[in-house]
Image (cartoon, rainbow, N blue to C red):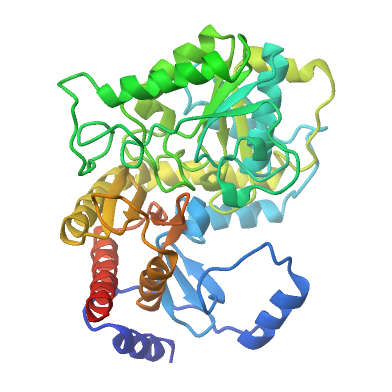
């Protein structure tokens, strides 16, 4: 019955895009009816927890890159629970490790030793260069960035921290000062000691063009750069220096940046920018923090960590999301000296590093290696970027396709010359049509104008072919409507 409903649903929406086969059969949905779920949502769940789509999805089960709703419909998940499901929904190796630990020991807190925290700390740091060898385990990315800010200030005895405009580093009251997207800001005091600097965006910013970023796909803007010299980088570095000279004291606590901006729509900086910025920050006595919440664990394909793509070694890195494949865990990794600054007084975390989380995290690392998912991110991600670039060349409203590995942004515009964001109602319909054809995509950008494609790293080239055809169909449908009007 499930297979029949799926085939009927697909054929009623699109005859062009054929969903790749999947031999997994979901269990029958047995919980409350859909309408009752909506009623509970309205009455008992905080309204700030907003849902996607006009008719919100009621998801029931997941298997690797696939999700199934309460009626048995199958969806290709290109957003991975907001870039969190790294190795695949209900990956058997991770599931088995969690089930085994559940029967052994759930929780002790870190006032006692237990095997998994020590085994995991050793394994995780083996993936990192010296001197990043000390781990503090937390429960979320916001908490990790909050703690990284605290460590930077304690260690340097300075207060001011610089971040990029367009950055997202968390929603906690402390980390919200680093988050520079207006829709996340509330009308209460936050951000004391946090200064934003110009985002070196080579597509939407004032400088940049066709030779500036580390991606298989460059912008369509003309570039004045010569071989080995990025003029856009020089201009953005001057803006960074201007921030240092006008907005902060002579000594600072640090600088935080994502190697590729996530929530802002896979925004990439000019090649070489972070390396120069790190040097300028360290000259001011600050530490450099790399937010690897979305770029870590092989997602960029060419490297295991996003900072490695910029040829830098930060002083602190923060990890979350893909670290646990959906299990709530996160980490701050830093040097012995910086970690010692936190040991001057008590700083305690009840659930961070619990046995279950550490076993899950260890299994995720094993799955990435055994399934060769970093290479898959590189191969499949590059293939997808090049296929999406064909849509950019065909459709005037596809302004930019960018990214690295399986961290991809598709920025929608009214036209390529003006780069004005495509109106929300138009993007919404394209996005809804993709969902109706079986593909789930994220949204991001300052104007919610960028489609975020960041799937589980187990995705295949056949899945990409299906997804690109669905997006192509949705774009053609939109252009047909626009022409009729």
Q: Quadrant of residue 479?
A: bottom left
Q: Position of residue 432 (x, y in %)?
A: 41, 73
| Picture quarter with the C terminus | bottom left
Residue 14 against residue 440 in the figure, above or below: below
Tell me if 16 is positioned left or right of 124 in this view: left
Q: Quadrant of the N terminus?
A: bottom left
Residue drawn 27% across and 82% down?
Answer: 14
**Which quadrant of the structure image shows residue 20?**
bottom left
Residue 91 appears in view: no
User: Could you tell me residue 211's position as x and y percent?
Assistant: 20, 32
Name which quarter of the figure residue 433 lies in: bottom left
Horizontally, residue 458 falls left or right of residue 194, namely left
Residue name at image x 65 percent, y 47 percent? 185
Q: Is residue 41 left or right of residue 133?
A: right
Does 186 sit above or below residue 342? below
Q: Is residue 421 visible?
A: yes
């Amino acid at each position: 019955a499930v297979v029949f409903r799926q085939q009927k649903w697909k054929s009623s929406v699109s005859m062009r895009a054929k969903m790749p086969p999947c031999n997994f059969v979901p269990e029958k949905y047995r919980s409350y009816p859909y309408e009752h779920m909506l009623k509970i949502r309205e009455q008992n769940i905080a309204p700030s927890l907003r849902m996607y789509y006009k008719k919100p999805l009621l998801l029931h089960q997941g298997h690797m890159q696939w999700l199934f709703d309460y009626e048995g419909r199958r969806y290709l998940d290109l957003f991975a629970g907001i870039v969190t499901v790294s190795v695949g929904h209900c990956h058997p190796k991770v599931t088995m490790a969690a089930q085994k630990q559940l029967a052994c020991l759930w929780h002790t807190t870190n006032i006692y030793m237990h095997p998994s925290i020590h085994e995991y700390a050793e394994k995780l740091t083996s993936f990192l260069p010296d001197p990043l060898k000390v781990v503090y385990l937390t429960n979320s990315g916001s908490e990790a960035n909050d703690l990284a800010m605290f460590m930077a200030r304690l260690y340097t005895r300075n207060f001011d921290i610089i971040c990029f405009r367009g950055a997202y580093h968390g929603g906690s009251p402390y980390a919200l000062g680093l988050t520079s997207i207006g829709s996340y800001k509330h009308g209460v005091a936050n951000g004391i000691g946090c200064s934003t600097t110009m985002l070196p965006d080579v597509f939407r910013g004032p400088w940049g063009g066709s030779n500036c970023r580390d991606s298989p796909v460059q912008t369509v803007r003309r570039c004045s750069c010569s071989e080995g010299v990025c003029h856009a980088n020089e201009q953005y570095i001057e803006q960074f220096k201007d921030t240092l000279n006008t907005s902060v004291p002579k000594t600072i606590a640090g600088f935080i940046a994502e190697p590729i901006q996530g929530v802002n729509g896979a925004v990439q900086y000019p090649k070489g920018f972070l390396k120069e910025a790190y040097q300028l920050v360290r000259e001011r006595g600050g530490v450099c923090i790399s937010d690897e919440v979305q770029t870590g664990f092989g997602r960029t394909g060419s490297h295991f960590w996003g900072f490695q793509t910029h040829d830098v070694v930060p002083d602190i890195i923060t990890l979350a999301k893909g670290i646990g494949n959906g299990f709530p865990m996160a980490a701050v990794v830093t040097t012995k000296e910086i970690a010692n600054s936190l040991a001057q007084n008590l700083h305690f975390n009840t659930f961070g590093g619990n046995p279950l989380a550490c076993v899950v995290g260890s299994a995720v690392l094993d799955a990435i290696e055994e399934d060769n998912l970093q290479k898959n991110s590189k191969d499949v991600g590059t293939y997808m970027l090049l296929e999406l670039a064909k849509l950019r060349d065909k459709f005037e409203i596809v302004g930019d396709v960018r990214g690295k590995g399986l961290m991809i942004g598709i920025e929608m515009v009214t036209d390529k010359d003006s780069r004005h964001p495509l109106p929300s109602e138009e993007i919404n319909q394209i996005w809804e049509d993709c969902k109706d054809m079986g593909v789930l995509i994220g949204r991001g950008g300052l104007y919610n104008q960028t489609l975020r494609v960041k799937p589980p790293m187990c995705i295949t080239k056949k899945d990409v072919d299906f997804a690109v055809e669905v997006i192509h169909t949705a774009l053609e449908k939109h252009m047909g409507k626009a022409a009729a009007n």
